[in-house]
Amino acid sequence: MHSCAIAAGGEAVCWGANFDGQADPPDGTYTAISISELHSCAIAAGGEVVCWGN
């Protein structure tokens, strides 16, 4: 299990299980974030959807 949040500066911060890269967000500025068991997705400041993990 993992969790993610958006820090005050807009960067995604994740912690917990990282078996499939789901807790290793790419650099960027985000406005929203959502997680599932093996992946995470966020909306970047420019409006694109960015996902990581499996």
Image (spheres, helix red, strand yellow):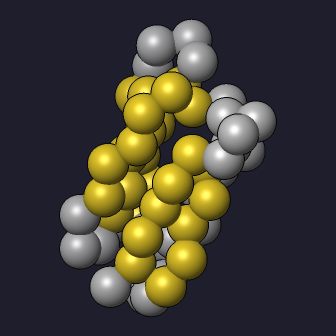
| Residue 13 drawn above or below residue 42 | below
The answer to which image quadrant residue 10 occupies is: top right
Question: From this viewpoint, is residue 33 visible?
Answer: yes
For the point 46% across and 13% down, the residue is 47
Q: Is residue 51 left or right of residue 34?
A: right
Query: How many numbered discs sit on the rendered protein?
Result: 0
For the point 62% across and 59% down, the residue is 13
| Residue 34 drawn above or below residue 22 | above
Residue closer to the observer: 23 or 20: 23
For the point 31% across and 58% down, the residue is 35
The answer to which image quadrant residue 25 occupies is: bottom right
- Farthest residue to the left: give it: 36
| Residue 47 drawn above or below residue 7 | above
For the point 45% across and 19% down, the residue is 48
| Residue 33 drawn above or below residue 21 | above
- Farthest residue to the front: give it: 8
- Residue 51, percent across and down? 41, 46
Residue closer to the observer: 9 or 38: 9
- Residue 21, percent across and down? 50, 72
- Quarter the C terminus occupies: bottom left
- Quarter the N terminus occupies: bottom left
Q: Is residue 17 left or right of residue 25?
A: left
- Residue 40, percent across and down? 37, 56
